[in-house]
Amino acid sequence: LIIAGGTGEFEAGISKDGQTREHALLAFTLGVRQLIVAVNKMDTTKWSEDRFNEIVKETSNFIKKVGYNPKAVAFVPISGWHGDNMLEE
């Protein structure tokens, strides 16, 4: 599951009608039981650990309601634009 970490973008995705919620629910409903959450656009937050932890906390609360065990879900901060934390060369 890829989540936008930018200010306002995460909030829109996790809102009541947001796509983040929809995609997590669809994944679980379709039988996906292992989940990795990539928090994208962390470069726009200057790699803020506080912002990352806030996103992890809110997302964990939601995915638990869906049926996932948040302790078994890996959260990875990434930047698709720069390729940070995505590839190993």
Image: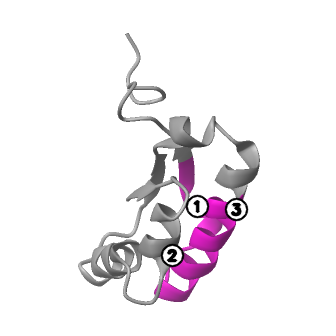
Q: Which residue is the site of mark 1?
A: 72
Marks 2 and 1: in contact by CB < 8 Å?
yes
- Looking at numbered disc 3 in the image, what kind of residue is underneath it? Glu
Q: Residues within 10 Å of mark 2 (few under 14, many from 20)?
A: many
- Looking at numbered disc 2 in the image, what kind of residue is underneath it? Tyr
Front residue of 12/20: it is 12
Residue 70 counted in the magenta span:
yes
x, y percent for residue 20: 39, 71
- In this picture, which residue range is highlighted in magenta? 54-75
- The residue positioned 38% from the left and 74% from the top of the image is 24
Q: Residues within 10 Å of mark 3 (few under 14, many from 20)?
A: few
Q: Residue furthest top?
A: 89
Q: Is residue 2 above or below residue 58?
A: above
The quadrant the N terminus occupies is bottom left
What secondary structure is found at the residue carrying circle 1?
helix
* Real-space Cα separation, disc 2 to disc 3, in angstroms: 18 Å
Q: Which residue is the site of mark 2?
A: 68
- Looking at numbered disc 1 in the image, what kind of residue is underneath it? Ala
Front residue of 5/71: it is 5
Q: Which residue is the site of mark 3?
A: 54
- The residue positioned 56% from the left and 51% from the top of the image is 75
Front residue of 82/28: it is 82
x, y percent for residue 88: 41, 17
- The residue positioned 28% from the left and 80% from the top of the image is 26
* Real-space Cα separation, disc 1 to disc 2, in angstroms: 8 Å
Q: Quadrant of residue 57?
A: bottom right
What secondary structure is found at the residue carrying circle 3?
helix
